[in-house]
Image (tube, helix red, strand yellow):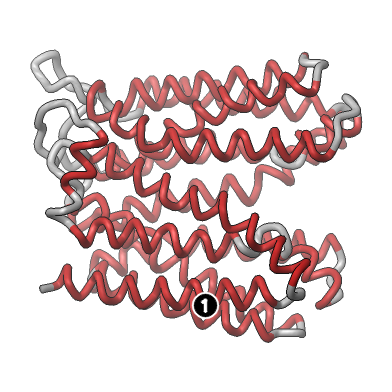
Amino acid sequence: MNDERAPGRIAFIIGLAQLGFATVIPLLPLYLTGQLGASVKLVGVVIATFALVETFFKTAWGGVTDRIGRKPVLITGLVLSALAPLIMAVLRTPVLFVPLRLVDGLGSAALWPAAAAAVADTTTPGRRATGMGMLNLAFLGGLAVGPALGLFVAGFTGQVRAGFYLSSGLMVLAVLVAALFFPGRRDGSEHAAAFVGYHTTVSPPRLTNLIGSYSMSPVLFALYLVAFVQMFGVGLLVPIAAIFAKQVVGLSEHAIGALFMAIVLAVAIATVPAGRLADRIGKRRLVAVGMILGALGMWLMSFSGRLAEMVVAGMLLGSSYALSAPAWLALVSEMAPPGRLGLAMGASETAQGLGLVLGPLLGGILWDAVGPRAPFVASAVVMTAGTAIAVAALRIRKR
């Protein structure tokens, strides 16, 4: 079903949810260590628990959306995520934040597969990358603004818990908007899914069915591999980027924060026109160009020592994501096995999440064992390999 307004409504809901999630990012470590006396090691466990659960359950939630619909899954995830910050505000035992973040990660994992599948359901192939660009705009906008909003509210009120209440309020608002405006079942005669759109229905999907379908669609498997490699390369820099900017380049904490926000917002704004461009000139071409720009940017970052060079490298990396992400998501949705769109979109997010979980582990090891530039060189090598895989896979897709 083609609904031109649906992608905008879906993106708005995801933007509210991501703003709520991101509000907690800087507050949780401060609250655990400053007010509850938790160790930094426990903070790491709390954060890792959320990341791991969110990563591994995206595929499962995606399959559930194919069974019962996108809307009930998304609302369930939002409700779980809205409860977590409320409990954080009253919880006084640090170790209990571990199971709490498990529930929080479970709720977060439901959102993106349901939203991405719903965008694919409600757009024609000729407008799908544009819809995915709107989804990326909302996600990145929330990620860029949320941490600053949380810190501002905590500073203004003098209470970190105020940020938790704000996070929960944003989630509750997202629930209400989703209940009213998220695309849902049109009448009782339809399939159990929220709606089918351009994707045919089959028997209830299982993960084994999806794995078996890869033998018939090696390009889809290659796209998942590219997603893992790309996020693994980015993940290598997660634990050391700010340290490198401060110790090697000489930037202040405020400058690092401002640079990060500027790059993320610029990329967010660029994703929608990039999606339109992909729909106009071809998704395969935009994915290939984006990957090439990302590899070039990472090589420049590996050998940069001045702010100007880092800015140029950051612009190349930002352009890489802005150009490739909407087109890549649209390609995955178009190659999803019939009736398994949600499962396929969830699996794509799991592949990316695995890269972001494993990459930081190696990045920190390389920094300590080899030197400050080692994670950047490793990331450049990984990104180059991912570019080669993407170009080869998309040539197969074209044939």
Local SS, label 1 = helix
Quarter-wise, where is residue 331 in the image?
bottom left
All told, the count of numbered labels is 1
Query: Is residue 202 placed above or below 243 in the rendered structure?
Result: above
Taking the spot 46% from the left edge, 79% from the top edge, the residue there is 293
Residue 109 appears anywhere in the view: yes
Query: Is residue 67 placed above or below 315 in the rendered structure?
Result: above
- Asked whether 266 or 288 is in front, the reply is 288
Image x and y of residue 153, in percent? 79, 34
Furthest toward the front, the residue is 369
- Asked whether 395 or 151 is in front, the reply is 395
Relative horizontal placement of residue 320, taking residue 285 as reference (left or right): right
Q: Which residue is mark 1?
A: 381
Q: Quadrant of the N terminus?
A: top left
- Asked whether 152 or 380 is in front, the reply is 380
Residue type marked 1: Val
Q: Quadrant of the C terminus?
A: bottom left
Query: Is residue 56 placed above or below 301 in the rendered structure?
Result: above
- Asked whether 230 or 278 is in front, the reply is 230
Image x and y of residue 389, in percent? 33, 72
Relative horizontal placement of residue 187, taking residue 34 as reference (left or right): left
Image x and y of residue 94, in percent? 80, 23
Quarter-wise, where is residue 327 in the image?
bottom left
Q: Dot 1, how many residues are within 10 Å of its Cα: few (below 14), some (14-19), or many (20+)?
A: some
Residue 273 appears anywhere in the view: no
Taking the spot 61% from the left edge, 35% from the top edge, the residue there is 21
Taking the spot 80% from the left edge, 65% from the top edge, the residue there is 243
Relative horizontal placement of residue 291, taking residue 2 as reference (left or right): right
Taking the spot 29% from the left edge, 62% from the top edge, the residue there is 222
